[in-house]
Image: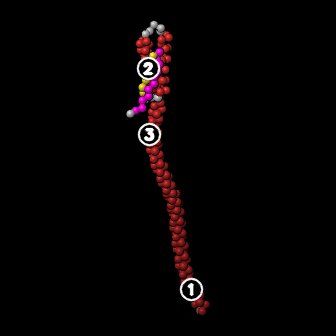
Amino acid sequence: MSNKNKVIVRIYGQEYTMVGNESKEYMQRVANFVDEKMIDIARNSKKLSTAMIAVLTCLNIADEYYKINQEIENVKEDALKPLQELEETRSQLATTIADFETREIEYKKRIEQLEEERRNNMKNNECEILKKEIETLKEALSLKDTEIKKAKKENEELENKVFDSQIKYVQARKELDAFIENFDEKSRK
């Protein structure tokens, strides 16, 4: 069994017995509220019967009840707006983070591509430097070849001159030998 509280209250000069699960103090406060409302309505209109005062009191209390419920609904809506905005913000944040992560991956890939391009450019630059060195060495080699050919030609010319000189020497020797022989023969005679 439930513990029901019982209290005798006075509303607009009449005594009533209230029974309920709430505390006696609470039930007394409710009864006092209704009593005050009925007294206020009776003060403003002295020609109304008790039944009409009770009905007008009920209407006023119902009006207050609905207005308070509407305020509660408005407060609930106002209280929910920040939560909804928070959820929207969280959703936007999640989208932004996902977009950021995607862009970060793209950024890292682009950095890797640029690094690869830089390495390739360095290799290309090294290749260009090596090509230039090869060209310089080829030019130097070509100059050396030209010098060697010139030296060989000069060598051949010198060899030819030496050969011609040897021939002239042999001829001169023969002439000298012949002259000496002739001279010796003439001097012996």
State the residue in front, 74 or 139. 74
Crowding at dot 3, Cα within 10 Å, few <14 / some 14-19 / many 20+, comes out as few
Query: How far apart are labels 1 and 2 at the CA level?
Result: 181 Å
Helix, strand or loop at label 1? It is helix
Q: Callout 2, which amino acid?
A: Tyr
Pointer 2 residue: 16
Residue 56 picture location, percent across and down: 43, 14
Q: In percent of the image, x 54 and y 69: which residue is there?
A: 151
Residue 105 picture location, percent across and down: 45, 47
Residue 54 picture location, percent across and down: 43, 15
Q: In which quarter of the view is residue 88 placed?
A: top left
Residues marked 2 and 3 touching at CB (< 8 Å): no
Q: Residue furthest bottom?
A: 188
Q: Callout 3, which amino acid?
A: Thr
The image quadrant where one finds the C terminus is bottom right
Question: Does 8 lie within the magenta span?
Answer: yes
Q: Is residue 171 left or right of residue 70?
A: right
State the residue in front, 81 or 137. 81
Crowding at dot 1, Cα within 10 Å, few <14 / some 14-19 / many 20+, comes out as few
Question: Does 170 lie within the magenta span?
Answer: no
Q: Please indicate, yes or no, whether residue 81 appears anywhere in the rendered image.
A: no
Q: In percent of the image, x 48 and y 54: which residue is there?
A: 120
Pointer 3 residue: 95
Q: Nearer the viewer, mark 1 or mark 3?
A: 3
Residues marked 1 and 3 touching at CB (< 8 Å): no
Pointer 1 residue: 177
- The range drawn in magenta is 2-13
